[in-house]
Image: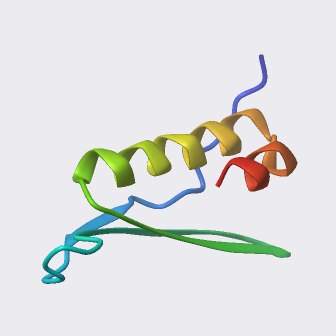
Amino acid sequence: MPHVSMLVRQFNFKRNNDKGGFQWTAESEIERPGFYNGFTAVGKTLADVRKFAALVRWCEQTGSWSGCTTRL
C-alpha cells in the first residue's frame, strides 16, 4: 500500500450557541498545489460532526473523493 500523507488539517470543532438547532460545527481544509477543498459540517451533537471528520479523512486516505461527495 503506498504511503498517503494526510493533507486534511486538524478539524476544528466548535460549540455554537444555537439553542435547539445545530450546536456543533467542524471545519477543515485540504490544500496542495493545484487542489483546494474546504469542509464544514454542522450537527446537533459532537458525535455527528466527528463522524463527518472521520469520513473526510477516510475519503482522503482512499483517494475516493467521487464516492464521498455523495455521502457528505
Q: In the rendered image, which quarter contains the N terminus?
A: top right
- On the picture, is 67 further left or further right than 50? right
* Residue in view at x 27 percent, y 60 percent: 44
The location of residue 19, given as percent across then percent down, is 13, 79
* Residue in view at x 13 percent, y 83 percent: 17
- On the picture, is 56 further left or further right than 44? right
Q: In the rendered image, which quarter contains the C terminus?
A: bottom right
- On the picture, is 21 further left or further right than 70? left
Question: In this view of the protein, which residue sits in the foreground, 32 or 63?
Answer: 63
* Residue in view at x 60 percent, y 55 percent: 7
Question: In this view of the protein, which residue sits in the foreground, 19 or 39?
Answer: 19
- On the picture, is 27 further left or further right than 29? left
- The image quarter in which residue 39 lies: bottom right
- The image quarter in which residue 43 lies: bottom left
The location of residue 71, given as percent across then percent down, is 69, 47
Q: State whether residue 61 is above or below residue 8.
A: above
Q: State whether residue 22 is above or below residue 10.
A: below
The location of residue 12, given as percent across then percent down, is 32, 66
The location of residue 57, given as percent across then percent down, is 56, 44
